[in-house]
Amino acid sequence: MNTLICKIDKEKIDQSVIDQAGSILSQGGLVAFPTETVYGLGADALQGKAAQRIYQAKGRPSDNPLIVHIAEIEALNRIVKEIPKEAALLADRFWPGPLTMILPKAECVPDDTTGGLDTVAVRMPDHPVALALIQAAGGYVAAPSANTSGRPSPTRAEHVAEDLMGRIDMILDGGAVGIGLESTIVDLSGEVPVILRPGAITLDMLSEVIGTVVMDKGLIEENSNVRPKAPGMKYRHYAPKARLCIVEGQQQNVIDRIKQLASEKCEEKVGIICTEETADAYHYGIVKTIGARNNEESIARNLYGILREFDQSEVEVIYSESFETPIMGQAIMNRLLKAAGHNKIIV
Ligand code: TXA
Ligand code: MG
């Protein structure tokens, strides 16, 4: 299959490109597009056959449900059984934005989209290209992150091309994304709202609007046998080719331990992930600066890109500092720990 790549400027959207992409989706095709979190791989959410193609293109297990993206709040009614009060409040406060809500699904949403579940995940992305595309496609676009299953999510169109060239119909290249980590997922289908995946919208931000919100047990109890409730969270994910090890603790201790571990390896075979504040301390191995500790957004934005960069090098092992920053820290460490298969040293 020939994959068409079209540049698109989010400040000055070329409607003819959007119309072309929209008609590909309406005909059951696949289009990758930028959102504010990561690039998504879109298909018409209400056509089961189109959703199936997403699983084929990504090599994604078919029990892992997709998020349905909408462009206006009125579109929610048609795909859910009911809109609980909490959902209305959260939509009002955080949509468009990096929040996905799980709600009981309406009949019209095919099993292929929800992985056979009786709930559906819904999100309204905060990106003009994504919103225009959803409108052009008829209002409902199922979109997982546009990576091959198991690889880090794409934060630039080049990452999408790396994984999916020749497997999808079109890539809309809107440049680098803003946030760099996937949306927060909150399950509103049960008694108490539960966070299934941490993201830029934190538990505190949600509680401020709807009161009690809890974290899924499968997320807090690392290495526990509790199964995460979002099917996708149980798979090994975001994983670089090299072995990744996270070193956590007081800053100087972390630096000392990483230097010691690195010096035991051959120079080209070891990678180090550090921050602007600590970069000068490392003189050995392939050292990459992820961002600044005093600018946690920069760390979130660069995480997946750095993991992909290391895949292009020969490193066998990567040592990373730990990033427990105030707001994005939980989401950053959730992804980093998954990428490391929970391989962590505390110093
Ligand atoms: O930021 C994002 O959410 C991005 C952009 C493209 O919008 N999308 C994204 O999709 O991260 P994906 O497929 O990579 O992750 C969706 C997660 C998976 O872990 C999946 O298991 C979970 O959401 N999920 C989807 N529907 C669900 C449902 N009905 N119940 C529980 N978990 C669900
Ligand atoms: Mg994903």
Image: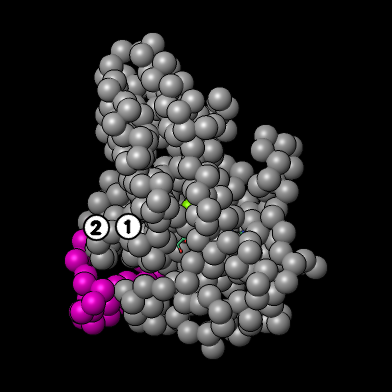
The residue closer to the viewer here, 24 or 5, is 5
- What is the crowding at mark 1: few (fewer than 14 residues within 10 Å), some, or many (at least 20)? many
- Give the residue type at disc 2: Thr
Residue found at x 33% / y 61%: 177
Pointers 1 and 2 in contact (C-beta within 8 Å): yes
Residue found at x 59% / y 48%: 233
Name, please, the residue furthest toward the right.
Answer: 191
Q: Which residues make up the magenta segment?
A: 3-31
- What is the crowding at mark 2: few (fewer than 14 residues within 10 Å), some, or many (at least 20)? some
Residue found at x 33% / y 65%: 33
Q: Quadrant for ligand 1?
A: bottom right
The image quarter containing residue 41 is bottom left
Q: Answer yes or no: disc 2 within 8 Å of ligand 1.
A: no
Tell me if 11 is positioned left or right of 117 in this view. Answer: left
Tell me if 227 is positioned left or right of 75 in this view. Answer: right
Circle number at residue 168? 1
Give the position of the N terminus as an image quadrant.
Answer: bottom left
The residue closer to the viewer here, 79 or 53, is 79
- Cα separation between marks 1 and 2: 6 Å
User: Where does residue 94 sit, x and y in percent of width and height?
Assistant: 53, 75
Circle number at residue 135? none
The residue at which mark 2 appears reads as 3
Q: For residue 53: magenta?
A: no
The image quarter containing residue 180 is bottom left
In the rendered view, would you say 208 is above or below 239? below
Q: Check disc 2 and report its element: helix, strand or loop.
A: loop
User: Where does residue 83 sit, x and y in percent of width and height?
Assistant: 68, 82
Q: For residue 23: magenta?
A: yes
Give the position of the C terminus as an image quadrant.
Answer: top right
Tell me if 220 is positioned left or right of 306 in this view. Answer: right
